[in-house]
Image (tube, helix red, strand yellow):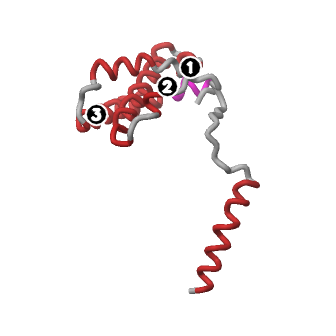
Amino acid sequence: MKMIKSGLTAFILVLPATAWSQGLIPTMEREFEFCEDRPTEPEWMQNLHVREADKRLTVQYIYRFQSAERVIEAGECSCATRFPSWDVAVQHFNDNFLTGDRNDLREATADFQRRYNELRPDARDICEREGHW
């Protein structure tokens, strides 16, 4: 038992040094391989109480779905097309789901996730050609 504790202690002490040497320390900085200037989520979404996480998830899936839809409709994947302002997704959420209960939000999230997943392969093909996936 003592040997297991010693091994576990050594592992816990060495792991951070190993991760640091490999550049695996997570940061809060946003780093992307493409479209560096993509808009951040609205601040209110980032500051929601954990009990309201369903709202954030719903808006995120609305945004993803709308993004894929725009890419396919435009037939191109510029940064502006793939990563527009969050305003349209937030407005759609406010108009349709703001007063919904948790079950309504879960259903909406599942619906937008399903719709996004249907469009995703076509949007991905377009974006991969332009190096934006």
Q: Residue at x 63, y 47 (%)?
A: 26
| Crowdedness near tag 2: few (<14), some (14–19) or many (≥20) residues, C-alpha within 10 Å | many
Is residue 18 depicted above or below 31 in this figure?
Answer: below
Cα distance in 3D space between marks 2 and 3: 25 Å
User: From which residue to which does the magenta span run?
Assistant: 124-130
Q: Amino acid at mark 1?
A: Cys
Q: In the image, is residue 126 part of the stretch drawn in magenta? A: yes
> Residue tagged by mark 3?
105
Front-most of residues 34 and 43: 43
- Position in image of residue 19 (x %, y %): 69, 56
Q: Amino acid at mark 3?
A: Leu
* Front label number (3 vs 1): 3
Contact flag, marks 1 and 2 (Cβ < 8 Å) = yes
Q: At numbered mark 2, what does the secondary structure look like: helix, strand or loop?
A: helix
> Residue tagged by mark 1?
77
Is 22 situated left or right of 81 in this image? Answer: right
Q: At numbered mark 3, what does the secondary structure look like: helix, strand or loop?
A: helix
Is residue 42 depicted above or below 49 in this figure?
Answer: above
Q: Residue at x 40, y 35 (%)?
A: 48
